[in-house]
Image: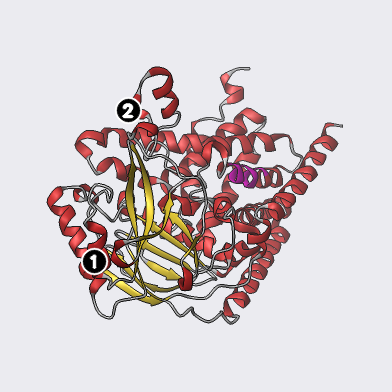
Amino acid sequence: MGLAQTWPGGRVAAAAFGLGAVMALGQAPLGFWWATLGGLSGLIWLVGRRVGASPAFWTGLFGGAGYFALALSWIVEPFLIDAARFGWMAPFAVVLLSFGLALFWGVAAALSAGARQRALGFAVALAAVEALRGVVLTGFPWAQIGHVWIGTPLDQLAAFAGANGLTLLTTLAAALPLVWGWRGAGSAVVVLGAVAGAGQMRLNAPLPDDRAVTLRLVQPNAEQELKWDADRARLYFVRQLDLTRTEPVADVTIWPETALPYIMEYSPEVAPQIAAASGGRAVILGIQRAEGDRFWNSMRVIGPEGLVMAQYDKHHLVPFGEYIPFGDLAGEWFGLTAFAAQTGNTYSDGPGPAVLDLGRFGKVLPLICYEAVFPLEVNAAPERADWILQITNDAWFGVWTGPFQHAAQARLRAVEQGLPLVRVANTGLTEVVNARGRVVAELPFGTIGALDAVLPGALAPTLYSRFGEVPVLLLLAGLAVLTLARVQTAAH
């Protein structure tokens, strides 16, 4: 088969890339969901006009690359923290990540090539591969198509079908006008309107009473490039102590991820200082924890006199950021210990999801940074919590898109679980979110400050918290069978 029979042409590839980029405008902070619907309809049409699986694959690939290149453009920010050493890697990171994730979209386009109704086939296949993207190779469910509805009434569907349900709704709505013309467009409007109306009714329903727990969320706004400088580290530590001791002291004070510039095991005087600043009340903070030659990215609850009340170790680490995949095997087999977590050169992973019992403050589901983007792992908690706590350091993600996308995805976890979410970030967004995913208190992004708030109440368990992805996977399977049946009918 010659290149002309496999490659759709430069113009088609460029058009697909552009349509994918238009789709990305629906992600936070812009939230132009209508651009996502329009761009997706265009991409579905473009894929459907390709003859054969290979041209469809390339068209889907370039569409996905355009989408991820813009939606995940924040990926360059970590390399610019120390630009002199790592800045040259930033363009390669964008290209490799964008085209790597776009492979899923290419596969979806190729699978749809044999369907009698190409638009419907691609819509279903795209929703399916987006679900796979969240779990394959530890998963990366960031900037899923369905995330464009976060903050609108339609996001309440996540309480029943999760983010993947929102994605399937979006891909089908974009495909219907291509399947049935104006009738399809009208049907898409009716369906989206019905989901939005039901979501608004859910948002208008009474919320449970707040818990009798006062919180203080500390946002130190520590610059990432200076955070570990010895002089600045002390300044940031003192800043957090001062924000903690301001009267009236809260029941629970929370500091962000890696808030402490010291290893507590090496600096035993630090915990009593924190306890004194809080008047002996609970302080939850992000630390780096050491045992021998191993280290963990952890959350610790400190009580009176600096005693440890509870602790959680992050279990879903960032590949290449917090650990090197197969690094321990490289150390064991080849002696390359620079990559091995077991010898302290990267973080070790914790045992898994956990719920910390804080007594009268309730049971809390702890999440550290990246863990908040994984709905299946939040759902895998060993018991139902009373609230969710995410601590994070989003200074790595820049100031334009990354922190806002991260916060939006965390808010969706509140909708899915029917639980309030407390989010404490080094630079922002620091906020308190109710059990329907709406922000009830927040600090301005990029500022120094402390936010005092009351902990919202929890709703009854949602359908998603009970059954996870089962409902939407059954729906996807049914739609896939219908698509396959059309393929077989066409073949005969």
Q: 184 or 31, which is in the foreground?
A: 31
First to last magenta residue range: 125-132
Label 2 is placed on what type of residue? Answer: Ala
- Element at label 2: helix
Closer to the chain start, of discs 1 and 2, is 2
Q: Residue at x 49, y 72 (%)?
A: 434
- Write down the residue under mark 1: 448
- Write down the residue under mark 2: 338
Q: Which residue is drawn at 68% across and 46% down?
A: 124
Q: How crowded is mark 1: few (under 14 residues within 10 Å), some or many (20 or more)?
A: some
Q: In which quarter of the image is residue 61?
A: top right
Whether residue 94 is visible, yes or no, is yes
Q: Tell me the chief SS of the magenta region.
A: helix
Whole-percent x, y for residue 381 in the image: 57, 55
Give yes or no for contact between labels 1 and 2 (Cβ–Cβ under 8 Å). no
Whole-percent x, y for residue 202 in the image: 62, 75
Q: Residues within 10 Å of mark 2 (few under 14, many from 20)?
A: some
- Compared with 483, 276 (above or below) is below
